[in-house]
Amino acid sequence: DTAVSQTPKYLVTQMGNDKSIKCEQNLGHDTMYWYKQDSKKFLKIMFSYNNKELIINETVPNRFSPKSPDKAHLNLHINSLELGDSAVYFCASSAQTGAKLTFGDGTRLSIL
Amino acid sequence: DAKTTQPPSMDCAEGRAANLPCNHSTISGNEYVYWYRQIHSQGPQYIIHGLKNNETNEMASLIITEDRKSSTLILPHATLRDTAVYYCIVRTLTGAQKLVFGQGTRLTINP
């Protein structure tokens, strides 16, 4: 039983395309996140939702739009993909209090 | 949240204790010390956290100095599967849940 699952695991696409990454958690957590890990391996938060409400938005370009249809899902849609978007994107979740996050295994996005 | 400083890399022999240090000299009274690790090609994994008392769980022990300005994560009997990047993070329990990851320590367990 995967706690935080992301799909797809790998995504290879061309510049200018639009793509989505899906995330689901079965832990009953109220808060979900998207993190980006670039080629230098720095992990940076992008967004956080609590009970479907956006609570953190870290100066991410408007081309990135998170959507949370319910508290168990947080999807990431990216418009007009650019070369710099190549990275590993991690979804995570946590209970409302505390900083104990559970991460998914990541989606490796490669832009050609 | 307070900043942390960790050595960029460490080596440890398999079966020995791995001691990973972390400095957090600007830590506030209500900030906790968290440790995560990231094994190659996987998502970060929570290890342990503490406020001021030493903590132990099935994965590791956390020793926090009395002045709370530094801490040590101890993996008592390191195995090859413990090779990973270890992150020390300081933050409060309240407020927006934003974990800030630094560069961490790349721990290599040698056979």
Image (cartoon, coloured by chain):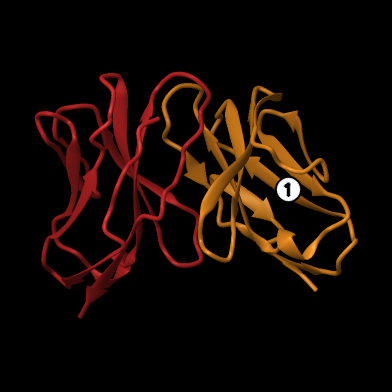
* Residue depicted at 87% across the width and 51% down the height: A79
Q: Which chain is red?
A: B
Q: Residue A70 falls in which quadrant of the image?
A: top right
Asked if A34 appears above or below A56 in the picture, the reply is below
Quarter of the picture holding the N terminus of chain B: top left
Query: In this view of the protein, which residue sits in the foreground, B47 or B73?
Result: B73
Measured as percent of width and height from the top left, residue A97 is found at: 45, 22
Measured as percent of width and height from the top left, residue A40 is found at: 53, 64
Residue bearing mark 1? A22
**Amino acid type at mark 1:** Lys
Q: Looking at the image, which residue sits at the far bottom?
A: B111
Q: Residue B56 falls in which quadrant of the image?
A: top left
Measured as percent of width and height from the top left, residue B50 is found at: 24, 32
Quarter of the picture holding the C terminus of chain B: bottom left
Q: Is residue A78 left or right of residue B45?
A: right
Query: In this view of the protein, which residue sits in the foreground, A32 or A38?
Result: A38
* Residue depicted at 25% across the width and 50% down the height: B59
Q: Is residue B101 visible?
A: yes
* Residue depicted at 32% across the width and 38% down the height: B34
Q: Is residue A1 visible?
A: no
**Chain that bears disc 1:** A
Q: Looking at the image, which residue sits at the far front?
A: B26
Please, what secondary structure does the residue beneath circle 1 have? Answer: strand
Measured as percent of width and height from the top left, residue B2 is found at: 35, 32
Q: Is residue B3 left or right of residue A88?
A: left
Q: Residues within 10 Å of mark 1 (few under 14, many from 20)?
A: some
Q: Is residue B16 left or right of residue B79?
A: left
> In this structure image, what is the colour of chain A?
orange
Query: In this view of the protein, which residue sits in the foreground, B50 or B80?
Result: B50
